[in-house]
């Protein structure tokens, strides 16, 4: 698994979302590198992590691999990366000193007593589309990520520039990622979360409703909730607010 390191200060691991790579965090990197030592992960099959084996993208497996390759740190996960970060915080509190979840919840799809997500048919349609028209399917997903954002066009341009900047993820990898998003449910584990957590939501997010993250913060024993007037990628539309919140959270864990 490719992980690059930049900056100085307390350690912070950055874990990207579906179809992306660590470069998507460039706006945060610019603002946090003077306050934190950043470890930017490319998940298996994404970016510079070109080797991929079946099961390598499973949140538990990814979390173990990241913990083995990085020092104890606060972990930040966006979207799919939030599931990896949460699994790491649950399984390895010795390695994960705190959790920052950005536009990520313990369950991504709607279900019984859980209206806070996307319909399973949406994920299935994306999986089917990858086989028919790979690039058009990625484009539709990027557009969905920016819906509701006050700077949707600017965010869409940024996502387009980054998505293939380190090569194209294999369609099989992306299908595995969609499958993970469709079946993972960590809601019941939240009360056992042993590390502090910060849940940063976009008020206009069309993929992960803010209500899902507000609920999650309330279930976590030491959870905090921050809502920004953003879509699914708050670190693109308001990078300074996200960077300040993250840096303050990291500093608090260092002082604890």
Image (cartoon, rainbow, N blue to C red):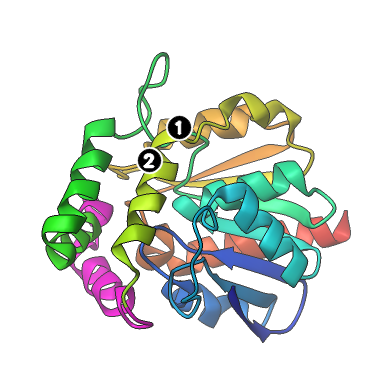
Residue at image position (48%, 80%) is 48
State the residue in front, 153 or 134: 134
Q: Quadrant of residue 166?
A: bottom left
Q: Most prominent secondary structure in the magenta stretch?
A: helix
| Left or right: residue 127 compared with residue 79 | left
Q: Give yes or no for residue 160 being in the magenta stretch.
A: yes
The image shows residue 71, relative to residue 86, as above or below, that is below
Q: Secondary structure at mark 2?
A: loop
Report, in whole angstroms, how far the alpha carbon at label 2 lies from the one at label 1.
Answer: 7 Å
Question: Could you classify mark 1 by the number of other residues whose Cα lies within 10 Å: few (under 14), some (14-19), or many (20 or more)?
Answer: many
The magenta stretch is 143-167
Residue 51 x/y as whole percent = 50, 74
In the figure, is residue 142 to the left or right of 205?
left
Q: Position of residue 125 (x, y in %)?
A: 18, 43
Name the residue that disc number 2 marks: 208
2 and 1 marks in contact (CB < 8 Å):
yes
Give the mark count. Answer: 2
At 73% from the left and 52% from the top, the residue drawn is 98
Q: Please identify the residue farthest to the top as the structure is shown.
A: 113
Q: In the rendering, at what x and y percent does residue 77 appear?
A: 55, 56
Residue at mark 1: 212
Q: What residue lies at 22% left-to-right and 74% top-to-bottom?
A: 157
Q: Position of residue 11 (x, y in %)?
A: 74, 71
Q: Nearer the viewer, residue 61 or 248?
A: 61
Is 173 magenta? The answer is: no
Horizontal side of residue 182 vs 152, given as left or right: right
């Amino acid at each position: 698994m490719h992980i690059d390191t930049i900056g100085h200060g307390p350690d912070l691991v950055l874990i990207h979302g579906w179809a992306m790579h660590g470069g998507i965090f460039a706006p945060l990197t610019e603002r946090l590198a003077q306050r934190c030592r950043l470890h930017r992960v490319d998940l298996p099959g994404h970016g510079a992590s070109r080797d991929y084996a079946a099961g390598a993208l499973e949140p538990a497996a990814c979390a173990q691999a990241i913990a083995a390759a990085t020092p104890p740190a606060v972990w930040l996960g966006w979207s799919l990366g939030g599931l990896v970060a949460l699994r790491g915080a649950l399984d390895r509190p010795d390695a994960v000193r705190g959790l920052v979840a950005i536009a990520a919840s313990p369950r991504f799809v709607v279900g019984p007593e859980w209206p806070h997500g996307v319909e399973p048919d949406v994920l299935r349609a994306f999986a089917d589309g990858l086989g028919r028209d790979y690039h058009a399917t990625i484009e539709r997903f990027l557009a969905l990520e920016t819906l509701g954002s006050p700077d949707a066009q600017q965010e869409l341009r940024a996502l387009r520039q980054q998505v293939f900047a380190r090569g194209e993820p294999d369609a099989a990898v992306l299908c595995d990622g969609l499958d993970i998003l469709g079946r993972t449910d960590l809601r019941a584990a939240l009360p056992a979360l042993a590390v502090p957590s910060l849940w940063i939501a976009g008020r206009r997010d069309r993929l992960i409703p803010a209500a899902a993250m507000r609920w999650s913060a309330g279930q976590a024993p030491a959870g905090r909730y921050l809502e920004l007037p953003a879509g699914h990628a708050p670190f693109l539309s308001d990078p300074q607010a996200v960077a300040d919140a993250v840096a303050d959270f990291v500093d608090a864990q260092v002082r604890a």
